[in-house]
Image (spheres, coloured by chain):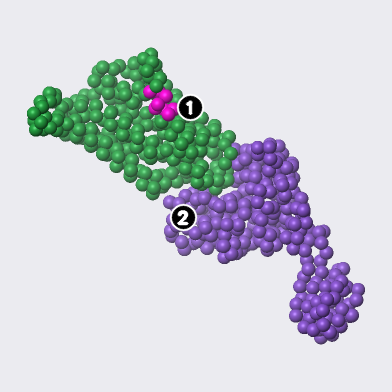
Amino acid sequence: MTVLRIDSLTKTFHKVRAVDEISLEIPADCVFGFIGENGAGKTTTMRMILGLLKPDSGAVWVCDEKVRFGMTPTNRRVGYLPDVPQFYPFMTAREYLRLCGEVSGLTPTQVKTRSNDLLELVGLAKTKKKIGGYSRGMKQRLGVAQALVNQPPILICDEPTSALDPLGRKDVLNILTEIRGETTVVFSTHILSDVERICDRTALIHQGKIVMEGSLADLKARHGATGWHLEFADPDSATSFAELMPTLVETKVGTEVTLRPGDKDEERAILRTLADHDLVPLRFESLAPSIESLFLEAVQ
Amino acid sequence: MKAYLSLCHKEWLEILRTYRLWIMLAVFVIIGLMNPMAAKFTPALLEGIGSSGGIVFEVPEPMALDSWAQFFSNTVQLGTIALIIVFMGLIANEFSRGTLVNILTKGVPRASIILAKLTVAIAVWTGSYLVCLGVTWGYTVYFWDPITLPHALLAFGAIWLWGVYLIALIGLGGVWLGSTTGALLTSVVGGIIVPLVVSIIPQTGRFNPISLAGGPYALLTGQGLPSDFIPAVLVTAGITLAAVIGSILVFNRKTI
């Protein structure tokens, strides 16, 4: 089932095409990484999905309902976490979630249950102080909670980790991983390691256009060969191993051997050969293409 | 409706916890006290100054009406300043701080945000104004014998409408230009200075909102008639309504 469909979306600011004929279909229950450098058009696209910005042309459907600029009933199915979420500093987290729950149409009982669950999820259940005294990481976690208050089928996060320290990033990524399965997460970022860590599918946006799209595994398979890199303690072990697997060895330099197995059987054969001949490598590393290399390949 | 009530509650919390409610009440209690006090003690004060300097001031005996004259003058002048300072960020602050994004992305009808803000601001203005009126009335009755005030409802209601008119214009400027400068532009320039300039033409007086700020006392003294005053009340009410509708229409088309 498709939860979000974007059809030929275009937006121009002062003669610059920020978003250029973008079309996308995002299936339910996946974590979708929307990757692009700063200024690529990620935020502009997200703002059009949320009806906060009027597209020049094209359309967006959220759960088969068309998004209209300004009047946004479709937002009842979407949770949104801005890159730097802003809150009312005079409220506590619980009061803020109550406001968000009530304006989303939840009943008082639902508001209470959801607030408790979400504050527990984001680790703010014990905090009594007003939001004005929160750190950036706490605000980002509260941002996730407010976005999920009405259990939306889609959660859109605009660079949720880019302004955080490593600990804050880890917290937010963990939360996004935890909600996988309940909510489709659309997640824009320029931090590629975050995408590798939590996304199932991804689209690369460059100068307003989508240059690559698909599941992470497919993209890696399509764009670059996979392989294994082994390092042994001494050159003799490396040589013996290379001689045992001549068809798979791509290179052998000193103590290091690179192999390109064609399928899973050949990968298993590597492990069997090592075990049968009592060869223990110091390092056994996958040579799958990184998202970074895919990104660089796509934008060049 | 539910979203509107929740947003009203949020506005109420904001005005309470940012101390703006207390500032408004304090200012209007002070104005309320000043009116009868100034009417009662200014003549005595002037006599005191006069006798020490050898000058004789011919000051008539103060009356209850003098207290009400002070009420209209002080509420309009000091009250207007306080009202504009307290509420100039009413909508503009939400734009400059970016706090509307989370709320709007919950699918809230935009009109309910504007209406909740205006409702609470008008409620606070109404409360402060009634407190001011009550304090002045209490001390006026205490210092002088009670008197009958002709057309009191129209006269006092006009000042209340003047406050509502300014709040609506502050809202319009805040939404339209997204800044406190915008709010000041529509309220101070559009709501006060332009009508003042227009009032140079005598024929416009009957319809000019500025008459609400300067005219009500004449109704109490019998120098003014309601029929001369009502067109300005209707025009002001019309501008207020147009500003509210305009704010909603502008907000519905605004990029956030």
**Residue A86: x and y, percent?**
52, 50
Q: Which mark is residue A131?
A: 2
**Along the horizontal axis of the image, is B242 left or right of A77?**
left
Q: Specify start and end residues of the magenta stretch as a single range.
A: B189-196
Q: Colour of chain A?
A: purple
The residue under label 1 is B242
Find residue B137 and report its image quarter. Answer: top left
**Along the horizontal axis of the image, is B26 left or right of A166?**
left
Measured along the vertical axis of the image, is residue B108 above or below residue A197? above
User: Could you say whether the residue bearing mark 2 is in a helix, strand or loop?
Assistant: helix
The chain that appears green in the image is B
**Residue B144: x and y, percent?**
15, 30
Looking at the image, which is closer to me, B60 or A33? B60
Magenta stretch: helix, strand or loop mostly: helix
Chain under label 2? A
Looking at the image, which is closer to me, A64 or A194? A194
